[in-house]
Amino acid sequence: MLASCVRFARLLPRDVDGDVDAVVVASVVPLSTELAFYLALPLIGWAAAQLLGGRPRALQVRIELAALAASVAVAFLLRHVVAEQGWVTTYANTIGGKWPWFAVGLGLAVAGAAWGTRPFEERPRVVRFGPGGAWACWAAAAALLLFAAYGGVLPRNAFALTPAQSQLELLLFALVGLCLVAPVVLGDASAPRTPAALLALAPVVWLGTISYGIFLWHYPLAWWASGEIPGDAWLFAVVACALTLACAAFSWYVIEQPLLRRTIGRGRSRAAPAAAEAREPAP
C-alpha cells in the first residue's frame, strides 16, 4: 500500500512517457525483487540465529539493529559504486539495490519483537510513541512525501532518474515508510485517537485487505490513464485510483481469496489425520 501511495504521488506531478515494455518491466521487477527477499529471509534468520544464539536478548537486539544500520550504509555505497562504474544497469532494482527498504522493515520487526509487547513506560525512550509523537511521525511522513513529489528534487519523468536522484528517492521513501509504520508497531496500544486506531477503521482495514492488488495494478493503470487523460492531473488521479481499487477488489474476491481458501483448506485437511494420529495413545 505504501509503495502504491508513493508512486501515485510521484506520478501526479510528473510525466510518464515510457512505452508498454517500460511499464511492464516497472511492474514486474518489484515482484521479482520481493520474491528474492522472501527466498533470502530464511537464510538471514538462520544466520542470525547461528551468530547470536545464546547471547542475552538485549545484546541480540542491539547487534541486529546495528548490523541492519550498517547494511543500509553498505547498500547505498554499493549503489553508488555500481552506478559510477556502470557495471550493472539494473542493480538499483535488485534486492541489493532496494535493500534499505527491506532493512527498515526488518529493523521495525526486531524493535517490535523486542519492545512492542512491553509496557509503554518500560520501553527505551527512542521507541516510545505516545499519541502526540505518533501523529508527529505521520505528519513527517506526509511532509517527506510531498517533498518527494513537489519539492523539485526528483524529475517529472518517472523513468529519468540520475544515479544521485535514485539514491535520494530510495532514502526519502525509506524515511516515509519508517515514519508511517514505526508509530503503529511501537505505539501505545492502549492510547485512543492514534494512527493505529485510524488503521483499525473498517474502510482502512478493507484497503489493507486488497492492498497487494493495489500494488500490482496501480502502475499499469496509472500509465494508461496518463495517456488517456493528458493535462488534467486531478482527473487522472481520480480515474487511476478508481480503476485501481476496482481491479484490486476484483483480484481479491475472485482470484486471491478463493485460492487462499483452497490452499488453507488443503493444508488443514492434510494436517487433520496427523493430528488425530498424534492424539492416539501409544501401544
Image (cartoon, helix red, strand yellow):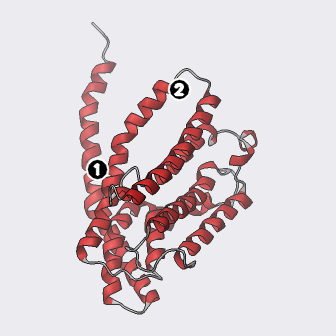
The residue lying toward the viewer, choosing from 30 and 83, is 83
**Residue 159: x %, y % from top left:** 37, 73
Closer to viewer: mark 2 or mark 1: 2
Q: Is residue 270 above or below residue 121?
A: above
Q: Quadrant of residue 153?
A: bottom right
**Residue 42: x %, y % from top left:** 38, 36
Q: Is residue 63 above or below residue 170?
A: above
Residue farthest bottom in this picture: 231
Q: Residue at x 27, y 25 (%)?
A: 274
Q: Quadrant of residue 222?
A: bottom left
Residue that numbered label 1 is attached to: 261
Q: Residue at x 24, y 48 (%)?
A: 262
Q: Is residue 188 above or below residue 180?
A: above
Q: Residues within 10 Å of mark 2 (few under 14, many from 20)?
A: some
Determine which of the numbered discs, if any, sits on residue 156 in the image.
none
The residue lying toward the viewer, choosing from 213 and 59, is 59
Q: Is residue 136 above or below residue 151?
A: above
Q: Quadrant of the N terminus?
A: bottom left
N-terminal label among 2 and 1 = 2
Residue that numbered label 2 is attached to: 52
